[in-house]
Amino acid sequence: MISHCLPVSLGDRSYHITIEEGLIASGRAAESIASLAPGARAVLVTHPGLRETYATPLLSGLQQRGVAASLVTLPPGERGKSLRAVARLYEAFLAAGLDRKGLVIVIGGGVLGDLAGFAAATYLRGVRFVQVPTTLLAQVDASVGGKTGVDLPQGKNLVGAFHQPSAVLIDPRTLLTLPARELRSGLSEVIKYGIIYDKAFFHTVQSDLPRLLRRDMAALSHAIARSCEIKAEVVAQDETEQGLRAILNFGHTVGHALEAVTGYRRYKHGEAIAIGMVSASLLGEEMGVTPPDVTGAIREALQKARLPVAFPADISADSILAAALRDKKTQGGQLRFVLARRIGEVFLQESVPPEAVRAALARQR
């Protein structure tokens, strides 16, 4: 059995990421969470489809260890990531008697983690929460780093807060029940970490993609651990995205805009980011900073992971630009993009000309 315990070093907000097969079924997740909340109340937040498989065993384990825990379910999907859903969670927290020593436990994917994490960040001006991510995308990205938030009709994550979890507990076996499309979506973010930070990891992932798609536990555990290590290193240096942490947004400017203009219905998050990473690489070519062979390597890895790389013909560049200008990453009405110099090295480019974006998207169609 492969097990990893990775620190996220943030002073008094530090915590550990535990990656271990069978963490939920064995009761080790319940034991770890109970140690954080002796005598406290806890509320587990999950989706109906995860209730019986993962949430109920964890709930029972906590209750057996003396934690007064209750369970609330919310429907899945980005369209439910709203202030209305946050209000529903506040009501559940109040009904459970959750006080400032209480604990919110999130069992699900990145959307639920963002939503319930934001509710935890703002209820009673902040209560502790634990992430138990069950999708690959959440395990390698959304559960680590303390970004929480909800969407507005105008764009993604426009309301949010930085609120670090008390622990992240990752059980790779949850990926065995994950739909294949969701697994591929998560691989997009895994590939991203290699592009932005670690050339050797990029090539390892590229070689391991057949094993990752087959859900080989050793390959998945390694990919999750290295992805979390990279994110933890970046977050430890720049917790609130004042500089370095912006590199984690590679592919996200076009990706988020594409999600918004298609009403969060056409693409999974990782699919939109895959398209956005090719957009960013082609934009880098347009601006003379990204060699064409880098674009080719990125496109090849994403295609090998069975992810989309072409920009949709029915979406206009102007609609993408308008959505991107509403994104929280824009400053002073100017577009900002993370661009690649080479595999393993990216940088934040300020004041990107709209005509360069249009040219890149035209080439990508």
Image (tube, helix red, strand yellow):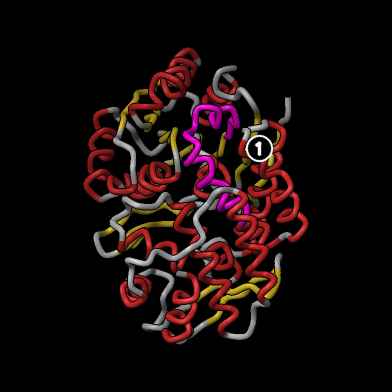
**Magenta span includes 85:** no
Q: Is 230 on the left-hand or right-hand side of 29?
A: right
Closest to the observer, 345 or 7: 345
- Total labels: the figure holds 1
Outermost residue toward the right in this view: 200
In the image, the segment drawn in magenta is: 170-191
Relative to 39, is 257 above or below? below
Q: Is 256 on the left-hand or right-hand side of 213?
A: left
**Magenta span includes 186:** yes
Q: Secondary structure at mark 1?
A: helix
What's the residue at 56%, 53% (across, down)?
A: 189
Closest to the observer, 278 or 100: 278
What's the residue at 32%, 61% (across, down)?
A: 260
- Which quadrant of the structure image shows residue 218? top right
Q: Position of residue 14 (x, y in %)?
A: 60, 48
Q: Residues within 10 Å of mark 1 (few under 14, many from 20)?
A: many
What's the residue at 65%, 39% (across, down)?
A: 212
Q: Which residue is mark 1?
A: 220
Q: Position of residue 248 (x, y in %)?
A: 56, 62
Magenta: predominant secondary structure element? helix
Task: Look at label 1 and name its amino acid.
Answer: Leu
Q: Position of residue 122 (x, y in %)?
A: 34, 49
